[in-house]
Image (cartoon, rainbow, N blue to C red):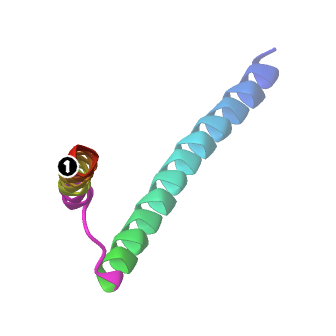
Amino acid sequence: MSKSRFVFDKFAKFLEEGLINYKDFSDEVVNILRSKKEEIILKLNLVSKDEIDILKQRVEKLEIKVAEKKIKKKIKRAKK
């Protein structure tokens, strides 16, 4: 009984260390991939999400102004 307990303890310890090592390994791979992604983004000179949101708001405002001017032109033409 003690020998089987010894084997189970060793097996459990082996699994535990394996899971910890796998977790560390997966975290390290994720960190490496993130750093590579950031390097690529910096090389491409891409804009941030905040800048994109600001540009979208500006475009929406301009579209509203253009739509208002089209409506005014249609109204003026109808009066002639």
Secondary element type, mark 1: helix
Left or right, 52 with reference to 14: left
- Amino acid marked by disc 1: Lys
Q: Position of residue 40 (x, y in %)?
A: 39, 79
How many marks the image carries: the answer is: 1
- Prevailing secondary structure of the magenta residues: helix
Q: Residue at x 18, y 56 (%)?
A: 58
Q: Is residue 48 magenta?
A: yes
The residue positioned farthest toward the top in the image shown: 1
Q: Position of residue 35 (x, y in %)?
A: 37, 69
Pick the residue in front: 74 or 37.
74
Left or right, 22 with reference to 9: left
Check the picture and name the quadrant holding the N terminus: top right
Mark 1 Cα shell of 10 Å, populated few (<14), some (14-19), many (≥20): few
Q: Position of residue 9 (x, y in %)?
A: 67, 27
Q: Which residue is label 1 attached to?
A: 76
The residue positioned farthest toward the front in the image shown: 80
Q: Which residues are magenta?
A: 44-55
Left or right, 13 with reference to 39: right
Pick the residue in front: 53 or 69.
69
Q: Image height check: is 9 above or below 23? A: above
Q: Image height check: is 22 above or below 41? A: above
Q: Is residue 4 magenta?
A: no
Pick the residue in front: 70 or 14.
70
Q: Residue at x 23, y 55 (%)?
A: 66
Q: Residue at x 42, y 74 (%)?
A: 36
